[in-house]
Image (spheres, rainbow, N blue to C red):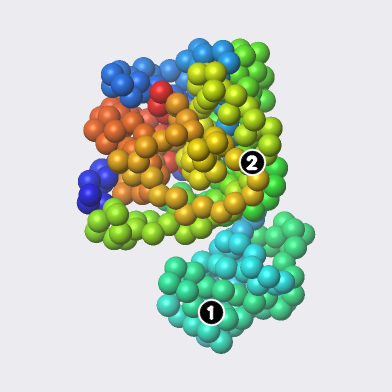
Amino acid sequence: MKTSDFSFDLPEELIAQEPVAERGGSRLLVLDRASGVMEHVLVGDLPRFLPAGSVMVFNDSRVRRARLYATGAGGGKVEVLLLRQEGPALWAALTTRMTKQSPGKTLALADGLEALVVEARPDERLLRFSREIDDGYLERNGHLPLPPYIHRADKPLDAERYQTIYSREQGSAAAPTAGLHFTAELLDTLRNHGIDVRFVTLHVGLGTFMPVRSERVEEHRMHREDYTVPVETADAVNRARAEGRPVIAVGTTSVRTMESAWTDLGLVAGPGSTDIFMYPGYRFRSIDALFTNFHTPESTLLMLVSAFAGRERIRAAYEEAMRLRYRFFSYGDAMLIK
Protein backbone atom coordinates (compact mmCIF):
# COMPACT_ATOMS: atom_id res chain seq x y z
CA MET A 1 0.00 0.00 0.00
CA LYS A 2 1.48 3.35 -1.04
CA THR A 3 1.69 6.32 1.31
CA SER A 4 0.65 8.51 -1.63
CA ASP A 5 -2.71 6.69 -1.63
CA PHE A 6 -3.52 8.87 1.40
CA SER A 7 -2.59 12.20 -0.16
CA PHE A 8 -5.03 14.99 -0.97
CA ASP A 9 -4.74 18.62 -2.00
CA LEU A 10 -6.09 20.90 0.69
CA PRO A 11 -6.52 24.63 0.02
CA GLU A 12 -4.35 26.54 2.48
CA GLU A 13 -7.26 28.72 3.58
CA LEU A 14 -9.10 25.66 4.97
CA ILE A 15 -6.39 25.01 7.58
CA ALA A 16 -7.82 26.51 10.78
CA GLN A 17 -5.40 29.02 12.29
CA GLU A 18 -7.64 29.94 15.22
CA PRO A 19 -10.31 28.09 17.20
CA VAL A 20 -13.93 28.99 16.57
CA ALA A 21 -15.27 31.89 18.64
CA GLU A 22 -16.83 29.57 21.23
CA ARG A 23 -15.75 26.06 22.13
CA GLY A 24 -18.26 23.56 20.77
CA GLY A 25 -19.36 25.80 17.91
CA SER A 26 -17.72 23.77 15.14
CA ARG A 27 -19.41 21.91 12.32
CA LEU A 28 -19.82 18.13 12.40
CA LEU A 29 -19.83 15.81 9.41
CA VAL A 30 -21.60 12.55 10.30
CA LEU A 31 -20.52 9.63 8.11
CA ASP A 32 -22.33 6.30 8.00
CA ARG A 33 -19.49 3.97 7.11
CA ALA A 34 -21.81 1.21 5.90
CA SER A 35 -23.80 3.29 3.41
CA GLY A 36 -21.51 6.27 2.83
CA VAL A 37 -24.39 8.65 3.63
CA MET A 38 -23.25 11.97 5.10
CA GLU A 39 -25.08 14.54 7.22
CA HIS A 40 -23.90 18.05 8.03
CA VAL A 41 -24.77 19.35 11.49
CA LEU A 42 -23.06 21.07 14.45
CA VAL A 43 -21.06 19.48 17.25
CA GLY A 44 -23.88 20.39 19.63
CA ASP A 45 -26.12 18.00 17.68
CA LEU A 46 -23.92 15.02 18.55
CA PRO A 47 -26.18 13.48 21.26
CA ARG A 48 -28.97 12.71 18.81
CA PHE A 49 -26.67 10.42 16.83
CA LEU A 50 -25.67 8.30 19.84
CA PRO A 51 -27.99 5.66 21.32
CA ALA A 52 -28.69 5.78 25.05
CA GLY A 53 -26.47 3.27 26.81
CA SER A 54 -23.45 4.06 24.65
CA VAL A 55 -20.02 4.43 26.27
CA MET A 56 -17.87 7.36 25.12
CA VAL A 57 -14.14 7.19 25.87
CA PHE A 58 -12.05 10.38 26.03
CA ASN A 59 -8.29 10.95 26.40
CA ASP A 60 -7.71 13.16 29.44
CA SER A 61 -3.98 13.83 28.93
CA ARG A 62 -2.97 17.47 29.42
CA VAL A 63 -0.60 19.34 27.11
CA ARG A 64 2.53 20.64 28.81
CA ARG A 65 4.09 23.95 27.78
CA ALA A 66 6.68 21.87 25.99
CA ARG A 67 8.17 24.33 23.48
CA LEU A 68 11.28 26.13 24.70
CA TYR A 69 13.48 28.64 22.92
CA ALA A 70 17.25 28.25 23.13
CA THR A 71 20.47 29.64 21.72
CA GLY A 72 23.14 27.36 20.24
CA ALA A 73 26.88 27.69 20.81
CA GLY A 74 27.21 29.70 17.59
CA GLY A 75 24.47 32.11 18.56
CA GLY A 76 21.73 30.62 16.37
CA LYS A 77 18.18 30.29 17.64
CA VAL A 78 16.93 26.77 18.31
CA GLU A 79 13.47 25.56 19.27
CA VAL A 80 13.23 22.59 21.63
CA LEU A 81 10.09 20.47 21.94
CA LEU A 82 10.13 18.28 25.05
CA LEU A 83 8.67 14.85 24.31
CA ARG A 84 9.10 12.79 27.47
CA GLN A 85 11.27 12.66 30.58
CA GLU A 86 13.66 9.69 30.70
CA GLY A 87 15.49 10.40 33.96
CA PRO A 88 16.51 13.18 36.36
CA ALA A 89 16.92 16.32 34.18
CA LEU A 90 16.99 14.01 31.12
CA TRP A 91 14.52 14.53 28.28
CA ALA A 92 13.90 13.18 24.81
CA ALA A 93 13.21 16.16 22.57
CA LEU A 94 12.82 17.43 19.05
CA THR A 95 14.85 20.45 17.98
CA THR A 96 15.06 22.69 14.98
CA ARG A 97 18.33 22.40 13.03
CA MET A 98 18.35 18.80 14.28
CA THR A 99 21.38 17.65 12.26
CA LYS A 100 23.51 20.32 13.96
CA GLN A 101 22.55 19.13 17.46
CA SER A 102 25.20 16.44 17.80
CA PRO A 103 26.38 14.89 21.08
CA GLY A 104 28.48 17.31 23.09
CA LYS A 105 26.72 20.43 21.77
CA THR A 106 25.12 22.70 24.36
CA LEU A 107 22.08 24.94 24.27
CA ALA A 108 21.42 27.97 26.49
CA LEU A 109 17.85 28.52 27.69
CA ALA A 110 16.01 31.04 29.86
CA ASP A 111 16.81 31.47 33.58
CA GLY A 112 20.37 30.25 33.14
CA LEU A 113 19.32 26.72 32.17
CA GLU A 114 21.63 24.74 29.86
CA ALA A 115 21.06 21.56 27.89
CA LEU A 116 23.74 19.13 26.76
CA VAL A 117 23.05 16.86 23.78
CA VAL A 118 24.00 13.40 25.06
CA GLU A 119 22.58 11.19 22.32
CA ALA A 120 21.53 11.63 18.69
CA ARG A 121 18.62 9.35 17.84
CA PRO A 122 17.06 8.97 14.37
CA ASP A 123 14.06 11.23 15.08
CA GLU A 124 14.96 12.96 18.35
CA ARG A 125 17.74 14.10 20.65
CA LEU A 126 18.38 13.13 24.26
CA LEU A 127 19.14 16.26 26.32
CA ARG A 128 20.58 16.50 29.81
CA PHE A 129 19.62 19.76 31.49
CA SER A 130 21.75 21.53 34.07
CA ARG A 131 18.90 21.20 36.58
CA GLU A 132 15.46 19.69 36.82
CA ILE A 133 12.72 21.22 34.66
CA ASP A 134 9.61 21.54 36.82
CA ASP A 135 6.11 22.80 36.06
CA GLY A 136 7.02 26.23 37.40
CA TYR A 137 9.84 26.58 34.89
CA LEU A 138 7.58 25.55 32.03
CA GLU A 139 4.83 27.94 33.15
CA ARG A 140 7.33 30.82 33.16
CA ASN A 141 9.31 29.98 30.04
CA GLY A 142 7.50 27.33 28.04
CA HIS A 143 5.08 27.78 25.17
CA LEU A 144 2.17 25.64 24.06
CA PRO A 145 3.37 23.43 21.19
CA LEU A 146 0.98 24.48 18.45
CA PRO A 147 1.48 22.32 15.33
CA PRO A 148 3.58 23.70 12.45
CA TYR A 149 0.60 24.21 10.14
CA ILE A 150 -0.67 26.91 12.52
CA HIS A 151 1.46 29.78 11.26
CA ARG A 152 1.61 31.93 14.37
CA ALA A 153 3.06 31.95 17.85
CA ASP A 154 0.95 30.75 20.75
CA LYS A 155 -0.97 33.42 22.63
CA PRO A 156 -3.01 33.62 25.85
CA LEU A 157 -6.16 32.29 24.17
CA ASP A 158 -4.39 29.02 23.39
CA ALA A 159 -3.66 28.36 27.07
CA GLU A 160 -7.37 27.55 27.41
CA ARG A 161 -8.42 26.47 23.93
CA TYR A 162 -5.52 24.09 23.18
CA GLN A 163 -6.49 22.03 26.25
CA THR A 164 -9.55 19.86 26.67
CA ILE A 165 -11.78 20.97 29.53
CA TYR A 166 -11.33 17.58 31.22
CA SER A 167 -7.53 17.38 30.83
CA ARG A 168 -5.91 16.01 33.96
CA GLU A 169 -2.41 14.54 33.95
CA GLN A 170 0.19 16.67 32.18
CA GLY A 171 2.36 14.79 29.70
CA SER A 172 1.40 15.47 26.06
CA ALA A 173 3.48 17.30 23.47
CA ALA A 174 0.34 17.97 21.39
CA ALA A 175 -3.35 18.14 22.19
CA PRO A 176 -5.70 15.19 21.69
CA THR A 177 -7.62 17.54 19.44
CA ALA A 178 -10.93 15.72 18.99
CA GLY A 179 -11.66 16.52 22.62
CA LEU A 180 -11.23 20.27 22.10
CA HIS A 181 -14.83 20.47 20.85
CA PHE A 182 -16.44 19.37 24.12
CA THR A 183 -17.88 21.80 26.66
CA ALA A 184 -19.12 21.06 30.17
CA GLU A 185 -22.66 21.64 28.89
CA LEU A 186 -22.23 19.12 26.06
CA LEU A 187 -20.81 16.51 28.43
CA ASP A 188 -23.80 17.05 30.74
CA THR A 189 -26.18 16.69 27.79
CA LEU A 190 -24.49 13.44 26.79
CA ARG A 191 -24.79 12.07 30.32
CA ASN A 192 -28.43 13.14 30.54
CA HIS A 193 -29.00 11.37 27.23
CA GLY A 194 -27.81 8.13 28.83
CA ILE A 195 -24.23 8.20 27.56
CA ASP A 196 -21.60 6.77 29.93
CA VAL A 197 -18.61 9.14 29.75
CA ARG A 198 -15.25 7.50 30.55
CA PHE A 199 -11.57 8.36 30.25
CA VAL A 200 -8.21 6.88 29.33
CA THR A 201 -4.86 8.64 29.29
CA LEU A 202 -2.41 8.53 26.40
CA HIS A 203 0.39 11.09 26.38
CA VAL A 204 0.70 12.35 22.83
CA GLY A 205 4.18 12.24 21.34
CA LEU A 206 5.99 11.22 18.17
CA GLY A 207 3.83 8.13 17.74
CA THR A 208 0.86 10.36 17.01
CA PHE A 209 2.35 13.20 14.98
CA MET A 210 5.47 11.80 13.30
CA PRO A 211 5.01 11.98 9.50
CA VAL A 212 5.17 8.85 7.36
CA ARG A 213 8.41 9.09 5.36
CA SER A 214 8.42 5.64 3.77
CA GLU A 215 7.06 5.12 0.26
CA ARG A 216 5.06 2.13 1.43
CA VAL A 217 2.72 2.34 4.41
CA GLU A 218 3.76 -1.04 5.78
CA GLU A 219 7.37 0.11 6.22
CA HIS A 220 6.51 2.92 8.67
CA ARG A 221 7.38 2.31 12.31
CA MET A 222 5.51 4.09 15.09
CA HIS A 223 7.22 5.54 18.16
CA ARG A 224 5.99 4.29 21.53
CA GLU A 225 3.62 6.33 23.68
CA ASP A 226 2.56 5.68 27.27
CA TYR A 227 -1.06 5.09 28.25
CA THR A 228 -3.21 4.16 31.24
CA VAL A 229 -6.65 2.52 31.26
CA PRO A 230 -8.53 3.03 34.56
CA VAL A 231 -10.38 0.04 36.02
CA GLU A 232 -13.69 1.93 35.80
CA THR A 233 -13.21 2.52 32.07
CA ALA A 234 -12.26 -1.08 31.36
CA ASP A 235 -15.31 -2.32 33.29
CA ALA A 236 -17.68 0.07 31.49
CA VAL A 237 -16.36 -0.81 28.03
CA ASN A 238 -16.39 -4.54 28.70
CA ARG A 239 -19.97 -4.43 30.00
CA ALA A 240 -21.06 -2.48 26.93
CA ARG A 241 -19.38 -4.91 24.55
CA ALA A 242 -20.91 -7.89 26.35
CA GLU A 243 -24.39 -6.31 26.22
CA GLY A 244 -24.16 -5.11 22.62
CA ARG A 245 -24.13 -1.41 23.50
CA PRO A 246 -21.99 0.91 21.30
CA VAL A 247 -18.54 2.12 22.34
CA ILE A 248 -17.49 5.45 20.84
CA ALA A 249 -13.88 6.66 20.93
CA VAL A 250 -13.24 10.39 21.05
CA GLY A 251 -10.04 10.87 19.08
CA THR A 252 -7.48 8.57 17.52
CA THR A 253 -5.44 8.45 20.73
CA SER A 254 -8.38 6.92 22.59
CA VAL A 255 -8.70 4.32 19.83
CA ARG A 256 -4.99 3.49 19.97
CA THR A 257 -5.17 3.11 23.74
CA MET A 258 -8.14 0.76 23.70
CA GLU A 259 -6.93 -1.32 20.77
CA SER A 260 -3.51 -1.66 22.45
CA ALA A 261 -5.02 -2.70 25.78
CA TRP A 262 -7.50 -5.16 24.21
CA THR A 263 -7.07 -8.89 24.73
CA ASP A 264 -9.23 -11.97 24.32
CA LEU A 265 -10.66 -11.08 27.73
CA GLY A 266 -11.63 -7.56 26.63
CA LEU A 267 -10.19 -4.21 27.67
CA VAL A 268 -7.49 -4.64 30.31
CA ALA A 269 -6.97 -1.92 32.93
CA GLY A 270 -3.55 -0.58 33.87
CA PRO A 271 -0.54 1.22 32.41
CA GLY A 272 1.18 0.30 29.17
CA SER A 273 2.91 1.65 26.11
CA THR A 274 2.00 1.28 22.47
CA ASP A 275 3.47 1.54 19.00
CA ILE A 276 0.31 0.21 17.34
CA PHE A 277 -0.17 1.30 13.71
CA MET A 278 -3.62 0.99 12.17
CA TYR A 279 -4.09 1.23 8.41
CA PRO A 280 -6.56 -0.38 5.96
CA GLY A 281 -6.80 -4.08 6.63
CA TYR A 282 -6.70 -3.65 10.41
CA ARG A 283 -9.65 -5.20 12.29
CA PHE A 284 -10.97 -3.06 15.13
CA ARG A 285 -12.09 -4.87 18.27
CA SER A 286 -12.93 -2.25 20.87
CA ILE A 287 -15.05 0.45 19.20
CA ASP A 288 -18.19 0.92 17.13
CA ALA A 289 -17.88 4.62 16.28
CA LEU A 290 -15.26 7.35 16.24
CA PHE A 291 -15.48 11.09 16.85
CA THR A 292 -12.43 12.74 15.29
CA ASN A 293 -11.02 15.78 13.51
CA PHE A 294 -9.96 16.09 9.87
CA HIS A 295 -6.37 14.89 9.53
CA THR A 296 -3.30 15.84 7.54
CA PRO A 297 -2.48 14.14 4.22
CA GLU A 298 -0.39 10.95 4.36
CA SER A 299 -0.54 10.87 8.17
CA THR A 300 -0.93 7.81 10.39
CA LEU A 301 -4.12 9.43 11.71
CA LEU A 302 -5.66 9.59 8.24
CA MET A 303 -4.63 5.96 7.73
CA LEU A 304 -6.33 5.01 11.01
CA VAL A 305 -9.68 6.59 10.08
CA SER A 306 -9.36 5.04 6.61
CA ALA A 307 -8.90 1.66 8.27
CA PHE A 308 -12.06 2.24 10.30
CA ALA A 309 -14.35 3.61 7.58
CA GLY A 310 -12.67 2.50 4.36
CA ARG A 311 -10.27 4.56 2.27
CA GLU A 312 -12.80 5.45 -0.42
CA ARG A 313 -15.43 6.45 2.17
CA ILE A 314 -12.92 8.78 3.87
CA ARG A 315 -11.73 10.20 0.57
CA ALA A 316 -15.31 11.01 -0.42
CA ALA A 317 -16.03 12.58 2.98
CA TYR A 318 -12.90 14.74 2.81
CA GLU A 319 -13.75 15.87 -0.72
CA GLU A 320 -17.25 16.80 0.44
CA ALA A 321 -15.82 18.63 3.47
CA MET A 322 -13.49 20.64 1.25
CA ARG A 323 -16.33 21.45 -1.14
CA LEU A 324 -18.41 22.75 1.77
CA ARG A 325 -15.46 24.67 3.24
CA TYR A 326 -15.06 22.77 6.47
CA ARG A 327 -12.10 23.83 8.60
CA PHE A 328 -9.31 21.28 8.88
CA PHE A 329 -6.80 19.97 11.45
CA SER A 330 -6.30 20.78 15.16
CA TYR A 331 -8.55 23.84 15.49
CA GLY A 332 -10.88 22.71 12.72
CA ASP A 333 -14.24 20.97 12.44
CA ALA A 334 -15.11 17.39 13.38
CA MET A 335 -16.41 14.07 12.03
CA LEU A 336 -18.48 11.34 13.60
CA ILE A 337 -17.87 8.02 11.85
CA LYS A 338 -20.51 5.48 12.84
1 sits to left or right of 126: left
Q: Residues within 10 Å of mark 2 (few under 14, many from 20)?
A: some
Using the image as rendered, state which of residue 97 and residue 245 is in the foreground.
Answer: 245
Q: Which residue: 28% across, 19% down?
A: 35
Q: Earlier in the sequence, mark 1 or mark 2?
A: 1
Check contact, mark 1 vs mark 2: CB within 8 A. Answer: no
183 sits to left or right of 14: right
Q: Nearer the viewer, mark 1 or mark 2?
A: 2
Using the image as rendered, state which of residue 337 and residue 293 is in the foreground.
Answer: 337
Give the amino acid at mark 2: Ala
Q: Is residue 16 above or below residue 129?
A: above
Q: Which residue is mark 1?
A: 119
Q: CA distance from mark 1 to mark 2?
A: 34 Å
Q: Which residue: 62% across, 14% down?
A: 194
Q: Position of residue 89 (x, y in %)?
A: 70, 72
Q: Is residue 235 above or below residue 107?
A: above
Q: Which residue: 36% across, 34% down?
A: 308
Q: Which residue is mark 2?
A: 269
Q: Quadrant of residue 322?
A: top left
